[in-house]
Amino acid sequence: MISAQFVFPRRLFLPVLLAFLAATAVANTAVEPAPRDANWVKRHEGFVAIARQGGVEVLFLGDSITDGWRKEDPKSGGKKVWDANFAPLHAANFGISGDRTQHVLWRLENGELDGIKPKAIVLMIGTNNTGLERDGKTPRNTPAEAAEGVKLIITKLRTKLPQTKILLLAVFPRGEKPDHPGRVQVAEINRLIAPLADKKFVRFLDIGPKFLAPDGTLPGEIMPDFLHPGEKGYEIWAAAIKEPLAAMLKAK
């Protein structure tokens, strides 16, 4: 008996290989737009309502560090600093505590920019893409994945608001000591997103060193929990972006 041999067509090898690699590749969650829980969606809907009213000249976009601008407690918020520096600029705060890049992407795709054409956007996102999930074992994202999420946010902002200037802030340092794992991850994210600046519409600004002591430690009086600024930290933030933001608002 002569057994037949199956010969795999050479012309199909590459397409099948690419399909296999795509199917087995680990997805980068940082670039996949995703909502969160019902309370989060309610906050998002509030931002959509603000956008529909129009009149926003400056938009702050980010996570809990941005969200903290609305907190009145000087130990964990900067409302007093916001009222003095940004409220007169017709600024809106679209920061939500706990957000990662994928959550901001979902918000941008679901109405938060509809009805507004801000002259400038202050963007900082990515710190919540670092570290581990609640199981304490699974990494959230690598710095490279988080940087891809930031890149996609910039792309979406440029597509929806092509005339808006973007002040892309380096993710603030976290952890008391310079060798804290979170600090190391954040530094790598910042290295990877710095080239997103195009010298025309997108400016990258790293104000992280302004929060640090000479030995590289993060003082508790600036960030009481070594992650979120207190009022003194928000004062440093406001002073650091005052001139670049003013330049963006004046630019034609």
Image (tube, helix red, strand yellow):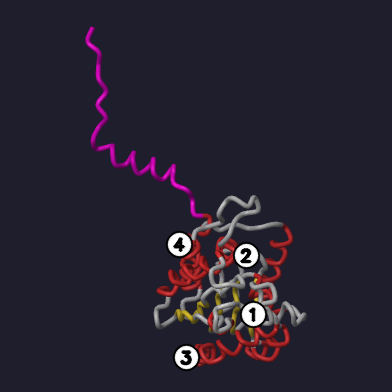
Near mark 4 (Cα within 10 A), the count class, few <14, some 14-19 or many ≥20, is: some
Residue for badge 4 = 144
Which mark is nearer the camera, 3 or 4? 4
Q: How far, Cα to Cα, is label 3 from label 2?
A: 30 Å
Q: Which residues are magenta?
A: 1-28
Q: How far, Cα to Cα, is label 3 from label 1?
A: 36 Å
Q: Nearer the viewer, residue 108 or 127?
A: 127
| Numbered disc 4: secondary structure | helix
Residue for badge 1 = 219
Residue for badge 2 = 99
- Find out whether residue 127 is within the magenta segment: no
Which mark is nearer the camera, 2 or 4? 4
Quadrant in which the N terminus is drawn: top left
Q: Considering only order in the chain, which callout, 1 or 3, is on the residue closer to the N terminus?
A: 1
Q: Residue at x 51, y 76 (%)?
A: 170
Q: Please provide percent x and percent y for residue 139.
A: 55, 54
Residue for badge 3 = 251
